[in-house]
Image (spheres, helix red, strand yellow):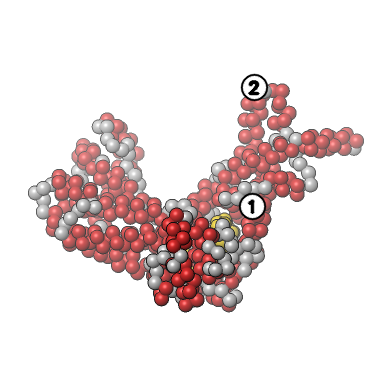
Amino acid sequence: MTTILLAQQQCFSSARKTPNATIASYEVAQLIAQHGKAFSDGEFIKQCLTKVVGIICPEKSQKFDNVSLSRNTVVRRIEDLSANIKHQLSNKTCAFDFYSIACDESTDATDTAKLLNFLRGVDNNFCVTEELLDLSSLNTTTTGKDIFEAVSNAIDKIGLKWDKLCGVTTDGAPSMTGKRKGMASMVCAKVQESGGEAVKMHCIIHQEALCAKTVQLNDVMNTVVKTVNIIRVRALYHREFQTFLTDVDAEYGDLLYHSEVRWLSRGSVLRRFYSLRSEIDQFLKEKDRPLHELSDPLWLADLAFLVDLTEHLNTLNKNLQGKDQLVPQLHAHMKAFCVKLRLFETQLRNFNVAHFPTLAEIRSAFPKANLSDKKEKYVSVITSLMTEFSQRFQDFSTIENDIKLFATPFMINAEEVEESLQLELIEMQCDDSLKNQHQLLSLPDFYRSLEEAKFPLMRRHAKRMTSLFGSTYICEQTFSLMTLNKSRLRTKMTNDHLCDVLRISTTKLTPDLPAILQTKGQLHCSH
């Protein structure tokens, strides 16, 4: 008994002398979570540290031995880090004047439906907090009611007020967007019951991808996919093709697969296929499987047109995925693209291919081919794309005036805005110093600089607009992390631990290690 007590005393004494060992343990656990590594990797890291220290500075081995990185310790450290981040978030929510949520649903490696909720809040100083609110498992059904209950629980659990919720952004699933039974409609109804007002929006990136799918040149796409599969599915063909590309010093070393789930992957597939068309033609002829379309200027023109159009769509998609963008910036990207489409439509009617360089290349390569006959087909594709964009972005049309007032308050007519804002807007528009500030500062900084006593309603409107999510891209990025963490090899990870890992991976907050250590009754000894 005495021996056990002495051992425990030595253990606690050692722990008290080496708080840095515990801090190091937390830091390593944080890295394990951020990089999606297995909790048990801590033990391997400890072995590596021990080996390195034993060789470089053996006299300090004891200090490194005190760093506890067993699987159970790493799990506890990650739980503590996540709890601290959540506590910080809870404190910040008390200062929110307005907030919005972004929700998206996917399935994990065990085919369990997971609902991600992200929170974006704005305080009186226009400081934006964007953090993971919750990860929920939907173990049975995934109706709008099920999703609403999960969202409602997450909001209530952290203590957010419903009347401050001003926006909910989702993907296009019916359970999310249904007019009566969709989750977004239920959330907006609850906000209204609480005395607030919320807008519901479809993810702008998701909508753009759906628009892109309407580009109907299936004969081209089907031929490309079929050819890629012939080469890539057969292992021998694939190896021989890669060797062939190396031998002929081709621009690329391989073909890419097309994924229907990620429609815009076709942009990369098509560009790679077009760039390697001569090599593909030569290789298939050697295999006695010629592809006659590769010698047909009309088919090549369709391929080139599709390459150019998908690259325009990909550029828009990348612009929409930029970090820390406000709704006006996303809206501006969409409006600019719609204007570009009108320009393309007008120019293609005269077969002006100034903005379709790949198509221009084919036209130059086949001067005798009557490619101008294709112009009606290409105009039709652009027209259908324009129609699809105008139909799918009704959500943003309903708040277009609000966006204009927020982004360009000096260019909007006071008669076009709500009566409650008109007098403040006129005061602002007549102040030349404010006009200069608006040109020099970011939107949040500009509205932060406004006198609260003089422009309370304009500031209020700006805070609402600043809090809005324009897309669920942050959810899609996090689902990629979820797939990395809960893979087919790690299916036993609990929902709570998965949520902890995702919170640590996505947070912009810094865990308060001194506060965590203060709440611990003891520092764990190495084992």
Q: Quadrant of residue 496?
A: bottom right
Q: Circle 1 is placed at which residue position? A: 85
Quadrant holding the N terminus: top right
- Residue 166 visible from this viewpoint: no
Residue type of the residue flagged with mark 2: Ile
Q: Nearer the viewer, residue 238 or 305?
A: 305
Crowd class of label 1 (few under 14; some 14 to 19; many from 20; radius 10 Å):
many
| Residue 445 as seen in the image, left or right of residue 221 | right
Place of residue 469 in the rendered image (x, y in percent of width and height, measured from the top left) = 49, 61
Marks 1 and 2, how far apart at CA: 37 Å
Q: Secondary structure at mark 2?
A: helix
Question: Who comes first in sequence, dot 1 or dot 2?
Answer: 2
Crowd class of label 2 (few under 14; some 14 to 19; many from 20; radius 10 Å):
few
Q: Nearer the viewer, residue 332 or 443?
A: 443
Label placed on residue 55: 2
Q: Nearer the viewer, residue 466 or 361?
A: 466
Quadrant holding the C terminus: top right
Residue type of the residue flagged with mark 1: Ile
Place of residue 422 in the rendered image (x, y in percent of width and height, measured from the top left) = 46, 74
Q: Quadrant of residue 209?
A: bottom left
Place of residue 122 in the rendered image (x, y in percent of width and height, measured from the top left) = 56, 61
**What residue is rendered at 22% in x and 63% in y?**
380
Q: Secondary structure at mark 1?
A: helix
- Residue 78 visible from this viewpoint: yes
| Residue 488 as seen in the image, left or right of residue 320 | right
**What residue is rendered at 14% in x and 54% in y?**
371
370 up-or-down from 251: above or below: below
185 up-or-down from 356: above or below: below
The mark lying in front, picked from 1 and 2, is 1
**What residue is rendered at 26% in x and 41% in y?**
276
